[in-house]
Image (cartoon, grey):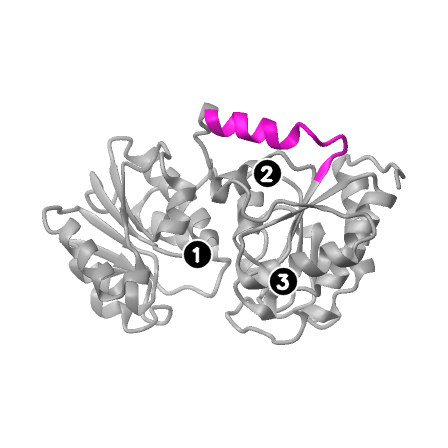
């Protein structure tokens, strides 16, 4: 490879979806140098996703809720460490501060055009400029630059412990129907769909398709509000599993699903990594940049673009688009999943 990679530190601290997108980078680098030792600086939430992963030797937690004390805690842990290479995959101010604490001759970041918050001041080397791509492909530009082929693109969200598999079996044991997890809300209101429409979808899944809808996600105020509306409006009450089992529990639920319905948020990318069919409802963010990566494109509901619009890949967000998605749009994709991906329709209302 272009640089020494025996000791590598990854700076990608937040966002579950981005954490998923880093995993193929790790796989590519480890294939090129199996002896590589990897330290990953992460916030506590996404750290749950990769803790114990076979390719991650060490996790350093950055607790942003502690303010400046969180930064100092990371600095103290890095004092006695040195690395051959830093992959600075996060281009925000907080990442710049953390990167400045790391001792390494090579700190690789994005090119000037894509490096936000003066990120380029904190790196020593930068990948070449390229047109905007899917976020996954942008991260894989780092492996290409280093000389580590990215193909095949591999995620591998394991290993699964015996305890996790037992939890997954116990979760699924009560269900007599194929389970369809529904990701009811996100961290941004503009990405959310109307919960009363989710309630209609739940009834149709149950009655018209013989499926068991299960509400999934965390327990943020907006998720709990969506949960309340859905449970009040649905005639055939779906099962709510919000917060059940934490992030690893959510992975287990998605892993056992027949189909997933998701907004533009981390569980969408977890589902793709698990190779489970997912209907993605997208309107605020550009689906070509942050939609399902190379899979299930036929199941994407695209409210971002105008009919027939060939929009470019960009970071532009478009407000107030999600209400354009009708219940029938979602159910048409469920029918498409049934016909193309082997789902069996069974009226069981």
- Identify the mark nearer the N-term, 1 or 3: 1
Instruction: Give the image location of residue 12, x and y in percent.
Output: 34, 54
- Identify the mark nearer the N-term, 2 or 3: 3
Quarter of the figure that contains the N terminus: top left
In the rendered image, is residue 337 in sight?
Answer: yes
Q: Secondary structure at mark 2?
A: helix
Residue depicted at x 38% and y 38%: 27
Of circles 2 and 3, the one toward us is 3
Q: Which residue is mark 2?
A: 253
CB of mark 1 within 8 Å of CB of mark 2?
Answer: no
Q: CA distance from mark 1 to mark 2?
A: 19 Å
Of circles 1 and 2, the one toward us is 2
Residue depicted at x 58% and y 63%: 222
Label number found at residue 295: none
In the rendered image, is residue 104 in sight?
Answer: no
Q: Secondary structure at mark 3?
A: helix
Instruction: Give the image location of residue 269, x and y in percent.
Output: 54, 49
Residue depicted at x 48% and y 39%: 248
Of 105 and 210, the residue lying toward us: 210
In the rendered structure, the answer to whether residue 205 lies left or right of residue 220 reads: right
Examine the structure image and report whether residue 283 is included in the region drawn in magenta: no
Q: Which residue is mark 1?
A: 15
Q: Which residue is mark 3?
A: 225
Instruction: Give the image location of residue 289, x and y in percent.
Output: 54, 61
Q: Which residues are magenta?
A: 163-179
Picture quadrant of residue 50: top left
Q: Secondary structure at mark 1?
A: loop
């Amino acid at each position: 490879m272009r640089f020494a990679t025996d000791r590598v530190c990854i700076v990608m601290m937040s966002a579950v979806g981005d954490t998923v997108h880093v995993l193929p980078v790790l796989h590519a680098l480890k294939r090129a140098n199996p002896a590589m030792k990897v330290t990953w600086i992460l916030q506590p939430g996404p750290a749950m996703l990769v803790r114990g992963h076979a390719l991650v030797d060490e996790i350093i937690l950055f607790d942003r809720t502690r303010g400046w004390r969180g930064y100092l805690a990371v600095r103290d842990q890095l004092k006695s460490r040195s690395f051959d290479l830093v992959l600075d995959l996060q281009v925000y101010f907080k990442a710049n501060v953390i990167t400045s604490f790391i001792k390494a001759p090579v700190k690789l970041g994005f090119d000037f055009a894509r490096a936000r918050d003066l990120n380029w001041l904190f790196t020593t080397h930068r990948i070449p400029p390229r047109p905007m791509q899917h976020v996954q492909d942008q991260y894989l530009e780092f492996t290409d630059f280093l000389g580590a082929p990215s193909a095949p693109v591999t995620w591998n969200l394991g290993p699964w412990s015996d305890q996790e598999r037992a939890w997954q079996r116990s979760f699924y044991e009560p269900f007599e129907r194929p389970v369809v997890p529904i990701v009811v809300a996100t961290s941004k209101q503009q990405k959310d769909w109307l919960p009363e429409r989710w309630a209609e979808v739940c009834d149709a899944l149950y009655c018209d398709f013989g499926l068991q809808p299960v509400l999934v996600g965390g327990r943020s105020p907006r998720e709990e509000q969506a949960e309340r509306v859905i449970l009040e409006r649905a005639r055939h009450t779906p099962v709510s599993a919000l917060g059940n089992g934490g992030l690893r529990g959510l992975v287990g639920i998605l892993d056992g699903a027949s189909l997933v319905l998701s907004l533009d948020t981390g569980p969408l990318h977890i589902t793709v990594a698990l190779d489970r069919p997912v209907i993605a409802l997208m309107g605020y963010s550009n689906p070509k940049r942050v939609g399902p990566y190379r899979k299930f494109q036929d199941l994407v509901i695209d409210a971002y673009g105008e009919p027939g619009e060939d929009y470019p890949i960009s970071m532009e967000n478009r407000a107030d688009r999600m209400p354009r998605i009708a219940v029938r749009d979602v159910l048409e994709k469920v029918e498409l999943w049934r016909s193309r991906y082997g789902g069996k329709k069974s009226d069981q209302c």
